[in-house]
Amino acid sequence: MAPIIIFPTLLLAVQTGGASGAVNLPGFPEVNGFLDFMLAGAMIQSCLLAGNSGGIALAVDIEMGFTDRLLAAPISRFAMVLGRLAGTAALGAFSAVYYIVLGLIFGAQIEEGVLGIVLMIVFVTLSAVAFGGIGAAIAIRSGSASVVQGLFPLVFVILFLSSAFFPYELMQEPAASIAEYNPVSLIVEGVRDPVISTLTGEDALKAFISIIGIIVLSLGLSAGALRHRLRTGG
Amino acid sequence: MDAIEVRGLERAFGDEVKAVRGIDLDVAEGEIYAFLGPNGAGKTTTVRMLTTLLRPTGGTAKVAGHDVVSEASEVRKSIGVALQEAALDPLMTGRELIRLQATLHGLSRAEGEKRAEELLDRVDIMYAADRRVGTYSGGMKRRLDLASALVHQPRVLFLDEPTTGLDPVSRKAIWEEVQALNDDGATIFLTTQYLEEADQLADRVGIIAGGLLVAEDTPTALKAEIGTAHLEIAICDGELERAQEVVAALGKPLPSKDGLLMLELSGGASGVAPVVRALDDAGLAVEGLDLVEPTLDDVFVQKTGYHLEGDDEEATAEAEPVPAES
């Protein structure tokens, strides 16, 4: 729990405190404050870290043999992955509520109101499942906690090459183009939209499609990795 | 119907490593079958195939009447499994772990609670039921693992090296529990690298080396294959040859070893007294005497060419075993 809350909160505090003048840059989206812009990025950062942590936990279970206990039971073998993802989803939901409350305490405004809050919680929860699925697939395929942990820096590469903390329109090339097409940007903008403006269906739809796409892809990879593990023993 | 039927079971890892190279075996209902072999012999790979955790690359296996590949789910309903390293979540309590296992096997919450009470009491760790598993000793973890494997009252129980790394007291406690489970009707397939464990517990022993089953029978029959008991007698200096002549008619002389007179006795322990009397009548002083019964280690040496215990350097999967006679 601590890594997905403390680190993004600190980054949120540092960036909001030190770079709030960014909102005055020409081309920066119209927002009530820099915190409003940053909240979605913190939530998705939290989801990415939750997915990575979930992958590490699953890999530890594989290393210590705990998954064998589950695989030897008369239950669907994919339930082992789904159970882990359910836990990651709960972390995502908690994270969404935490950052919304934190934002409201420190003066953020959710333009779309209650409907916007519900949509944000749903998107962030599903995002946690999506990123958790990627962590699970890598964990099952590698069976090594250190491999999954080694991907931790990638979380920040993916985040900083998206519009999580800065509008991609203001980035330099090639980062701007990468960020524009980075699915994480689409997800962040879908979560951010209800905060900084009234809801636009286009951003929400793009975010939803991106999340579902990653979920389908990551669950497929996880299922394939599990089949491979059972067939080959590793 | 046998509880376990295996025909030509094989498991290869890539093109080069063949961990199991065509095993045939049958384990009857209610039997304790011990799979004896050194590290890397193929014991755990075989257990993982029989418990549906690993697909065979050749041959067939049925457990509780169900094929381990095509009816894997039915197999899993019928078996209990305690794997080599007690795979327990250190953050869970013993009671939580049993309840989790009960849920995995479809027991209701009330049934799970009841089974947890019964099993924790049975394996004598009720006093630590609500402590985190991370605080348990090695022996307690193994007993908890055993209890969790019993939660759904399985017909066939697989125990992969249940006592490896345990102290003698904990080992004996596990043995007693395994014997009690068998007395209650459970079929038990256990792997071990301890000769004494196989000798004490098993109705039948299968010796595996280099992925092949090289011998299989009751411990008594396997030892009888090796021969009968022999005497090792320490004679005073310079009298070995004369002593050999004196006792030659009382048994089958064996080549002397370390200056000891070696004599195989067809009648076992009853043949000791005549030998001692003959030596005494001949005026030969006996400085020491030991009646050595054949052991499973002797069987192991004969079948594989190396010792199972205390000879780890040689006891590897690379060692070429002598194939079992059909």
Image: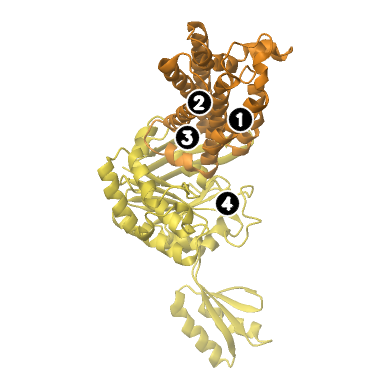
The chain painted yellow is B
Residue tagged 3: B59
Please report whichever mark, 4 or 3, sits nearer to the chain's N-terminal start. 4
Rendering coords of residue B111 (x, y %): 26, 44
- Direction right: furthest residue: A173
What's under tag 1, amino acid-wise?
Answer: Ala
Secondary structure type for disc 2 = helix
Kindly report which numbered mark, 3 or 2, lies closer to the viewer in this rendering: 2
Residue tagged 1: A13
Residue A78 vs B235, above or below: the answer is above
Rendering coords of residue B297 (x, y %): 54, 62
Q: Which numbered disc covers residue A159?
A: none
Q: Is the residue marked by circle 4 packed among few (<14), some (14-19), or many (20+) residues within 10 Å?
A: some
What's under tag 3, amino acid-wise?
Answer: Gly
Q: Are marks 3 and 1 in contact (CB under 8 Å)?
A: no
Which chain does the numbered disc 4 sit on? Answer: B
